Structures are given as C-alpha cells and as structure tokens.
Amino acid sequence: MSRVARRLARAVRASTCLSVLPLAFAATQTAAMADEYSAQWGLGMIGARIAHERGWTGRGVTVGVVDSGIIAGHPDLEPNVTPESFSGHTLGPSDGDAVGHGTHVAGTIAALANGVGMVGVAPGARVTSMQLSGPTGDIDETRLDSIAASAISFGLDRGIEFFNNSWGSDPMMPAGGTDLETVRTYFLNERPEMMATFRRVVDQGAVLVWANGNDGFPSVALEPGLPHLFPELQANWLSVAAVGRDGTLANYSNRCGLAMAWCLSAPGGGDDEDADGIYSTSNTGGYVNMSGTSMAAPHVTAALAIAREMFPNAAATDLAQLVLATSRDVGEAGIDAEYGWGLLDLANLTATREGTTASVFSQSQAAQASTLSQIAGTISNLAASHGSGNAMPGTVSLSSHGAAPGEAARYRLWGSMLGSFSSTSASATSPGSISRTGGMLTGIDVTLADGIGGGVGIGFTSGNSQGGGNTARATGLHAVAYGSYSAGGFFADAAGGLTRFETSRTRNAIAGAGGAVAFTGSSSAVDVGAWSNARIGMTFETVGATVQPYVQARLVHQWLGSSTETGAGVFSLAAPSANASQFDAGAGVRVAAPAMALGTVATLAPVVDIAYARAIGSLGDSRSATMLGAPVTATGNGIGRDIARLSAGVEVNSATSGLSGTLTYAGEYRARARSHALAARMSYKF
C-alpha cells in the first residue's frame, strides 16, 4: 500500500498517444459520421436518444469532473463548461488538460447537441473542471490527499451534487481479513483529508461516481469499494463497470464484485479502442476514441444530471438509487457480482415520469365510478318500477282501454343482488383494465295513491380491477334514496346515493423498473362517492304496451382520499386528495309490455329501456400523483363521450301474495369502455 499508482493517465488503453491525435484526423472522422448519435455508439445502448426525445437532457444541472482538466474552448463543449474551475495543484483555476482524459469525460457527459461531432449523454447539463493533475498531466502523489479533497470541496462549496471520478488506486479492494484492515488504516491515516471530504459528501447529500478500474479484477478498486469499509458512504456512492459494443463486460474492466449493491455497468469501449472505443471530445479541439471504465463512469454521471432535471426536489441519494433501480438487468438474474444492478438505461429512467406509471390510481377511480353508475341505474329502475314507471291514477295520457284502477298506499320491502363486469381498452397513455363487482342492496319504499312515492336503501359492494399488472380492490358501503311523482301523463323520478369506499391498490408493473429487484407498490385510501340521477317524461299506455319517453341527467362525483405507497422503494408514488366528476345527459324510452299470466299463480311483465347520453365536461378519469416530489399524472383510456345504455328485464308478480321478483340486465357502451350488470331483486308489498 506504500505505492498507490494512479490510473488517471493510463485509464484508457494507450491514452497518451490518442490524446494527441492531430486535429485533421479528428475532423475527417467527424465528417464520416452520419449524425451525433451514431458517432457515439454508447448513446444507443443506453437509450439516450429516447430520453432526449422525451425532453430530458440534464438542463440546468451542473456536474463536477474530477479529472485531468477540461479544454474549455472546445467548440462542442464551450457553452456547457462553467467559467468557474479549480486546480487542486495550484488551488486556483484549472490550467487546461495536458492529457485529454478529462476533456473526453466532459464530452461524454455534456457535449452539445449541435449536429457536429457527437452529443453528450446530457447535452443540457454543464460541467465544472476540478483538476487533479498538474500542467504536464502528472499527479503529485505526495499531495494527492489534499489535491483530491480540495477539488471535491470546491464543488461542494458551490452546491454541486454529482461528481465524476474517473481516477483511483490500482489495487483491488480486499473482501476481508488483515488486507482489508490494512486498507482501512491506510485511508484513515494516509488519506485523512479525503475521508473528511467524503464524510462531507454524505452530510451534504451529494453523490460520487467512480470508475471500477481497468485491471480485469473480479472486484472494484479501492475508492469505488470504500463503502465496503465505511458503510455510511454507500448511499452516496456509485461504481461503474465497462461494457463493450456487444453489451458484455470488457476484458479490462474490473467487475462489480463486493460493490455490487452500489454498482452498475455502462458503455466504456472495447479492447480495440480504435474500432470500438467511446468517441468523444479531445484536448486538440477534435474527437477521439478511448476505452476504459473512465469512459463508462461519465455515462452514469450524466444520467444523474437527467434524473435531477426530472426530479428537482428529490434527494441526490434517491436519484442515485433510481439510476441503479432503472438499470436493465443483464448477466445473471438480479444484482450480481459481474454487472451489479445491470446496464444503465435512460429509456427506463425517463419512463418513470410517464403517466402510465400511476395508472393504478386512475384505474381504481374509474372502476369505482362504474360501480356508482351501475347502482344509479339499478336504483333509478327501482324508482321507475314503483312509481313513475307504473300506470298509476292520473298517469295515463293516452289509453285505449280506460283508466288504471286506483289503490291505497302500499309499502314494499326489497332486496337486490348485484353483479357487474366492466372493461376498458388500452390506450397510448393507460393500459386496459377489467373490473368485477358484486354486492347487495336492501330497502323499503312507499307508493301513495296521489302519484307520489319514495324509498331508501342501504347495501355493500366488493369489487376488484386489474390492468397492466396492477390490481385495485374496493369495498363500498352505500346509502340510497329515491322518489317519484306522476300526474296527468307527466312523470318525474330522482335518485341519489352516497358511498364510502375502502380502497387498496397493488402496483406490480412499475414503469422504468429495470428488473434486478422486483418492486411492488401498495397503497390504501378511503374515498367517498356520490351520485344523482333524474328523469322527466310522459307516459303513453295502450293495449300493447306502456311507452315512456324521457330525458335524463346523471352525475357521479368522488372525493378521493390521499394515499402513499409502501414497498416500491424509490419508485413509490404519493397521491394527494382529489375530486373527480362525470356528468352526462341524454334521452331514452322505457317500454313495458302488458303482464302475461303464468297460470293462476303469477304474472310476468317484460320491460326494455334504451337510452343515449353524452358526457359533458370532465370525464373524471385522470389522477395526479407525485414520485420523488415530481408530478406524475395518470390519464384515462380516452373513453368515448357518447354513451348507449340498455336495460332489459322481467318482473314476476305473485297472484296470491305481495311477493315479486325481477331479473334485469343493464349495459353501458362507449368507445373503449363497456360495462354489463345483472340485478336480481325480490320484494314484498304490504
């Protein structure tokens, strides 16, 4: 441990000769490239173009490049290099980049999207040079402790959160025993300023990204492995292995090994860097290929800049965990000693803000709204069957067989079993879903001789909805009331209800999760729903049928309680309380055939109700949530506003008692949504 050889100058194969390639060669190579994305093959491997097309480029985020310096005047870097810089050697501004290593790293992070050369992983980000090497490219080993500590401290003083460290000690971090204790003693005694700075990194919540090392070891070098010695560093540490163009670990790359819990892989170039190296900016003003874990690390640092743009209020350590959790699982299933969490994946990372990730909330509220609408239809049919839908005294406006006989006030006890099935089709913003609900309602009503009637009821339902790998369950307690009036051929009925839902949700399909670890989000809430339905129309009775054309309006409203997920780790969503409403209005016709005798014991009467309605205003199918403090809005499936409703049933009445039974089908049909319900009701009049 007395000699800690630095790999900064040799972190890439033959970097010395590559760093001084003539500008003419670089320009020729640039002209041969079709575009900036194909020039740097690593961008395609990690989905950088997808992230950029989604609007995430690291805009407004500054990262620190702790390296050999940066040529600030490079035309593909200049606007993205901050005027502030620091040299740990002189404790003044950076004095350039003699070896080109830091300039190459900076280009991988933040080269401009300007149609020239190549583009950085985070072209909207800025980089600050924190120089370790002197003007000739050498590092003063005797002062390295203070040089590195002062460079990182410079960034911390200026609020920089993410630091790329493509440098470190060659030896592999021992797994245990006396060798591990020797390393511990070395860092505590020989690197006290570094250790103090690393603890300051933890205190300020910053993140250090480290290259694993280029010795082909089965585990990481010393600095990327420090959390193995000092576990308090782990949340603030990322270590990076290098993969080649074929997506497998390069022969030179140290594996993740004992650092696999905070390690991932990224494009670093192949062993033949002329053919397969990472193409980025050079200190000559042109471009050059380099290979090494030094080239892999800045891909990850740039990903942190994009994550910060996406989640401006999140802790930097949460963003580090997000980069790990969204990495694409490669190698052995799960977190492994070769690739760690997997391969950096910006398509996954930026998918975490897509509305589909919160679709479980919009699905559950849509299922509850469907339940409320089905109950509204059931109770409205009940209101029609005992008052406005019956031929009561004064209701006949046109009759071919005389007026209906009058009767005294009568009471009715009733109970209804409910079962429903609903489905929505998938859209670009939300997966399809299937909902099933069952339950029971019971109540009492009264019909008066003067055409006035009404009733009340209570009940419960239990339902579940599934879609896109997510499940929601809701248990509802319902209270309903209804009334009707009829006179002179005119009728009107109205119904309303109030529901308390206890809702639980399970989110298994988490957008952006890379697969190394299975995440499941669980949440619960108490929601309150209310509905109202009103109809007015005329009754026309003939020998063949009773026909009732009407106009109708229905309102379904929900007060949605707040909920916060558990079990989803960094992907956890929080949904604040919200309101959701659906309103529709339209017209329909109810046709009841004359009762048919079933021998001498009962009569049977079929009824059909056909209606059309148009949804007006909000569809009540979106729900806002937050992830890491940033908004994520789940939209609905784009269900249609035109609604067709069909209700058909039969009523059997006892000829010798007040018993009756009804079986009714009710369907609602609209673009991208269908619902079907069956209700079986028994009642007793007295």
Image (tube, helix red, strand yellow):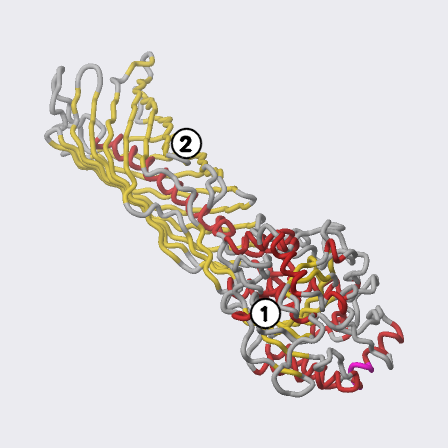
Q: Which tag is nearer the camera, tag 2 or tag 1? A: 1
In the foreground, 182 or 517: 182
- Where 479 falls versus 213 (above or below)? above
Which region shows up in magenta?
A: 185-189
Which residue appears at 54% of the width and 53% of the height? 351
Which residue appears at 17% of the width and 28% of the height? 392
Relative image position of residue 240 (x, y in whole percent): 71, 63
Q: CA gap, disc 2 to disc 1?
A: 66 Å
Of the numbered discs 2 and 1, the one sitting upstream in the chain is 1
Residue 269 included in the magenta stretch of the image: no
Relative image position of residue 669 (x, y in whole percent): 37, 32
SS state under label 1: loop
For label 2, the crowd category at 10 Å Cα-Cα, with few meaning under 14, some 14 to 19 and many 20 or more, is some
Assign the N terminus to one quadrant of the image. bottom right
Which residue appears at 78% of the width and 56% of the height? 272
For label 1, the crowd category at 10 Å Cα-Cα, with few meaning under 14, some 14 to 19 and many 20 or more, is many
Q: Magenta residues: mostly which secondary structure? A: helix
Q: Label 2 amino acid?
A: His
The residue carrying mark 1 is 74
- Where 103 falls versus 337 (above or below)? below
Q: Is residue 23 visible?
A: yes
Q: Is residue 455 visible?
A: no
The residue carrying mark 2 is 676
Assign the C terminus to one quadrant of the image. top left
Task: Find the residue positioned furthest to the front.
Answer: 24
Determine the image quadrant of residue 533.
top left
* Relative to 648, 110 lies left or right: right
